Image (cartoon, rainbow, N blue to C red):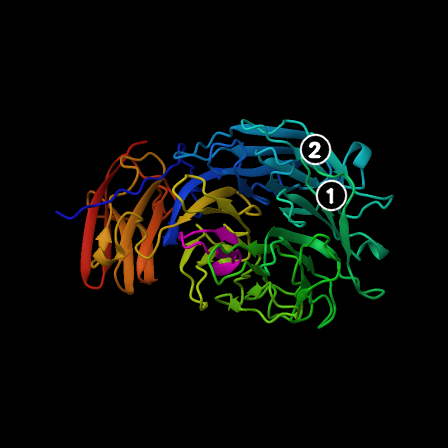
Amino acid sequence: MKRILTLLILNLTFVILPAVPAAGQTTYNLQIMWQKGSPDKPVPGAVPYWGYVMCGGDLNADGYSDIVSYTDSIIELGGERLRCKIYIFHGGPAIDTLPDQVIVYDSIGAHPSLCIADFNHDGYNDLAIGDDNGVGASANKGCVNIHYGNGVDVSSTPGLVIISPGSATNTSFGVTISAGDINGDGIDDLIVGAYSWGVGNSEGRVYVYYGDTLGLHTWPDVYMTGHGEAGYYEFFGHDVSSGDDMNGDGYDDILVGAHGNCKTALAAGKVYVYYGGAPMDTVADGWVYGEGYEQTLGVFNVSNVSADTAGFNAVGWFGTPIWPSNAGDLDSGKCYMIPGDVTGEITPLFTVLGNNKSSGLGCWSSSSGYSDKDKLEDLVAGAAYENDDKGAVYLWLRKPTMNSQYDAYILGRYGIPGAHGDVMGASVAKAGDVDGDGKDEFLISNYWADSNNMIWLCKYTGPDGIEDENVENVKEVKLLQNVPNPFTHTTTISFQLPQPATVTLKVYNIAGQLVKTLVNEDKKVGSYEVKWNGCDERGQWVSNGIYIYQLKTGGRSMVRRMICIR
């Protein structure tokens, strides 16, 4: 008898997908480990920003990475003030959908930025929250609030508030933050972007605050200023990233996005590399220019991607959804992987383009962490506009020789021509090892979808998609039992293909009548998960009872039964 592996879905509550439109959710070599809808009721007509910024890190010192994101809502006309709730979900073998800690800001000046690091070297990670508008003493200046960790929870109120230095206001101080050991003393330092600093509020500056056993310094130890000429300042510091030694000198380095740079074309953009040091100088060591008019390279997130394997250094990873448009319009998009050990103008090691003219690949990009246990972090990018805004997220495993063929993907649930669909991939982020299995997971959101805003936690499951089964044993088509079964609202159907093929996956009632077509397309070799939300082709809930799902591919047909209980 063939051994059938049951895929465990760690959701403790099931999310009801929208009845109309509805479709199966397809994954390739990925498993959805956890998903969570917005915990707050959205403000009518407003973007809820659930999943706009996400991060992972061990905040309670239990060895599992935790998940952090937030919701916010306007509390003043014009949006000058927001009420923000920051939700923390502790990692573990099973991940709850109820938050373990909620930090409430009754008044915050802007959508926060987030960062997790140990800034005071006490062995417990801290949570930094950037507010680029500020409140109280930091009103209109911006600040970063530090919530120190203690091994259980982070402090519910800031233990330290770092306010934008000097007298300048409206500099966007705190719009982006990151952490890394820039001066090599073994303590995490804080990097803060302020892209509206300087002439015309558009020159830009980035500040570095050294960590210390007594806490972060409150006055910058280093700062870098954007370059440009009158009328063409570059908005230096809209995005920053650190945490990795890119040139192998023992100091973590910094990536800085400057999307307004006009060297190659108006607002083509630029990404800088600064090497850390003791002391660190403020002259850029390397850079990459955007390629065309208003492609704004450096505005859509920049990321460091770690390497812990001999012969490899950390790299930079970022993109723009506007490439190759020369009109500043959404286009296929392009992502860039760059070396950090090259000075001057940098030639990318690897680039990848979106699938079609409306993919928008690179609307967000990130390291996915060590997805496949090879000690090289991997690359993930969102294409939120693909297929009528259905959206998609693609994963590339880092290899000695990279190619544009993705190693895994997940597709959004529905597209709507001319309107926002699911826009899966609007944001992506590294989560760390949330379930403690030695492999890192990554986070995905659709934060600007019109409804059903969601955060997904995904794991790369390898060529066969089943971690515990050797790929050499996958020599035939497999259709696995749906999970959960019986189900009330949503269930997951998994199947495997040993070779590329045209696949149909359909659901029938016990009388043999077609209820729902979940898949009807060509598929590559690999493992797939498809979610069915218990709706028929018209978007109506099906009744209680037994249903048959049938997989057809390559002249073969396989069926299984499932039970729906409302």
Residue 100, position in %: x, y? Answer: 51, 28
Q: Nearer the viewer, residue 129 or 231?
A: 129
The stretch drawn in magenta includes residue 375? yes
- Residue at image coords 58%, 57%: 363
How far is mark 1 from mark 2, CA to CA?
25 Å
Q: Nearer the viewer, residue 153 or 41?
A: 153
The 10 Å Cα crowd at callout 1, few under 14, some 14 to 19, many 20 or more, is many
Residue annotated with mark 1 = 132
Residue 285, position in %: x, y? Answer: 69, 64
Query: Which portion, as a residue range, is magenta?
Result: 367-387
Q: Nearer the viewer, residue 328 or 186?
A: 186
The stretch drawn in magenta includes residue 486? no
Left or right: residue 373 versus residue 319 is left
- Residue at image coords 56%, 43%: 54
Q: Which mark is residue 253?
A: none
The 10 Å Cα crowd at callout 2, few under 14, some 14 to 19, many 20 or more, is few
Left or right: residue 546 versus residue 50 is left
